[in-house]
Amino acid sequence: MAKPPLSMKPTGWFQVAWSDEIAVGDVHTMKYFDQEMVAWRAESGDLTVMNAYCEHLGAHLGYGGTVKGEVLQCPFHGWQWNQQGRNVCIPYEDRPNRGRRIKTYPVVERNESVYIWHDIEDRDPFFEAPDIFADFGDDSSAADYFPQQRLFRQGLQMHPQYVLENGVDFAHFKYVHNTPIVPVFTRHDFDGPVSYVDFTITFEGDDGQRIEDINSGVEAINGGLGIAVTKSWGMIDNRTISAITPVDEFTSDVRFMVYIGRPADQSGRDPARAEAKAHDFGAEVIRQFSQDIHIWAHQRYSDPPALASSELAGFTAIRQWAMKFYPDGRGGSAAELAAADSR
Ligand code: FES
Ligand SMILES: [Fe+2]
């Protein structure tokens, strides 16, 4: 294992929890980007994510803090903090402390996930977190799919960019996932902070197939480095979300979610059997992602890498794109070289 040479403080949307982990009145404790944080849900259902330490004398709000209506009350001296991190009540004074503020994070809840915007320069979000249904523009919704299946792996020594680079890494499919044939990329769009990668692939048949005859593939939308959503076509209808969030300078948490499509015509089918089959298929998709994790969690990020000539364009494009998310300029030398080459 090796410490990632890339900055662990990239800018973007990152998953910090699942919505159903934080009910009304809950105060959820977590650590991301080397910060102790709390996520708490007010009576109204609004979710706030903020740094965990009270600005008064520094109590950790995740250990005994309580939700009172729309504010969070500190367990130490009862000061109350609102959803903007402002102090709104000191119970033994006439007026609150208007000067001090606990840092809060922009938050969206989408596809059952809680995403926060992280930026060490505190800029406003400059792109949106991807939506696994709306962003593919096909009028799909969660109702078309069986319940979400999940994988959660904590504290792995890896960086979000490893996962994104998988999206241009055609050569690994055959070896890590035992696909019969090397996929072919049909789209690499790295112009904006949201990038698009499409490829033709099959997981079935033998290696006698020709790629021109394959009628299945995957479309991926990468919302920055933190969240990627995929949609498959021509095979069992499945969608995935992979979300990798740095915890500290060494490790990240990995969340992976799979949706399996419900059959369009459900007449004459045994619903319990269909759901069981979908569950098995979802477990297989998760197993395949776990094969990648097994590599990522132990790899030493190669920078600059020894690329084959057929890999040069894809890796250069994605490493250059990744630079957008490193405001501190520590994207890694390969990314910097790529950026310099293009000037
Ligand atoms: S430390 Fe929070 S109210 Fe005193
Ligand atoms: Fe992979």
Image (tube, helix red, strand yellow):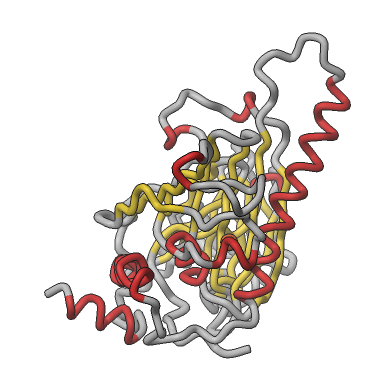
Camera-side residue of 305 and 33: 305
Tell me which image quadrant ligand 2 sits in: bottom right
Residue 323 image position (x, y, % from top left): 30, 72
What residue is shown at x 41% (from left), y 30% (from top)? 137
What residue is shown at x 49% (from left), y 54% (from top)? 183
Camera-side residue of 52 and 92: 52
> From this viewpoint, which residue is outermost toward the front?
208
**Is residue 276 depicted above or below 328 in this figure?**
above
Give the number of callouts: 0
Camera-side residue of 66 and 286: 286
Residue 149 image position (x, y, % from top left): 73, 45
**Is residue 291 depicted above or below 229 in this figure?**
below
Image-quadrant location for residue 65: bottom right
- Left or right position of 276 against 335: right
Residue 86 seen anywhere in this rendered image of the structure: no
What residue is shown at x 54% (from left), y 72% (from top)? 246
Image-quadrant location for residue 237: top right
Residue 60 seen anywhere in this rendered image of the structure: yes
> From this viewpoint, which residue is outermost toward the left?
343
Camera-side residue of 29 and 313: 313
**Is residue 92 depicted above or below 6 in this figure?**
above
Residue 184 image position (x, y, % from top left): 43, 53
**Is residue 228 depicted above or below 97 in this figure?**
above
- Left or right position of 310 against 300: left
> From this viewpoint, which residue is outermost toward the top?
267
Q: Quadrant of the N terminus?
A: bottom right
Residue 238 image position (x, y, % from top left): 62, 38
What residue is shown at x 88% (from left), y 25% (from top)? 272
Q: Quadrant of the C terminus?
A: bottom left
